[in-house]
Amino acid sequence: MRLLGTDKLIEGWVNAFPGGDVAVCAAVLSTIFVAAFVLDAFEIIFVAAPILIPPLLIRFEDAVWVSRLVLLTLQASFLLRPVGYC
């Protein structure tokens, strides 16, 4: 997907998102949460995370905090049906 320029397209969308850093973080986390309904956590990590997370980490100074929020959101895929383990 990077070969086709998808990462630059998503980065442009993230940078143009109105509402500030908190709104961008909420939008990316909600996208990951919605993907957790149909994808497994490993699929999200290998498909969505390399494209969605780098522009998000660039906007925030504390990357550890944002990474923890992303990991908490990824835990939803373990709880939600139809692919949830729990």
Image (cartoon, rainbow, N blue to C red):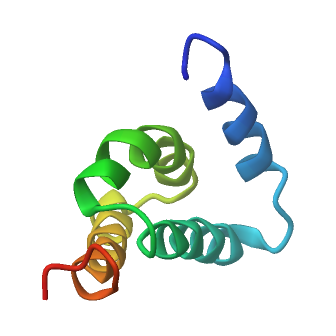
Q: Number of labelled discs? A: 0
Residue 43 in the image, given as x and y percentages of width and height: 31, 49
Quarter holding residue 17 = bottom right
11 versus 29 height, above or below: above
Quadrant into which the C terminus falls: bottom left
Image point (70%, 76%), residue name: 23
Residue 60 in the image, given as x and y percentages of width and height: 50, 59
77 versus 80 height, above or below: above
Image point (35%, 58%), residue name: 63
45 versus 29 height, above or below: above
In-front residue for pair 57/82: 82
Residue at the extreme top of the image, as rendered: 3
Quadrant into which the N terminus falls: top right
Residue 52 in the image, given as x and y percentages of width and height: 53, 48
Image point (29%, 62%), residue name: 40
In-front residue for pair 46/40: 40
In-front residue for pair 41/65: 41
User: Position of 71 compared to 29: left or right?
Assistant: left
User: Position of 65 compared to 14: left or right?
Assistant: left
Residue at the extreme front of the image, as rendered: 82
User: Position of 22 compared to 73: left or right?
Assistant: right
84 versus 35 height, above or below: below
Quarter holding residue 41 = bottom left
Residue 66 in the image, given as x and y percentages of width and height: 38, 67
Residue at the extreme left of the image, as rendered: 86
Image point (65%, 14%), residue name: 4
Quarter holding residue 55 = top right
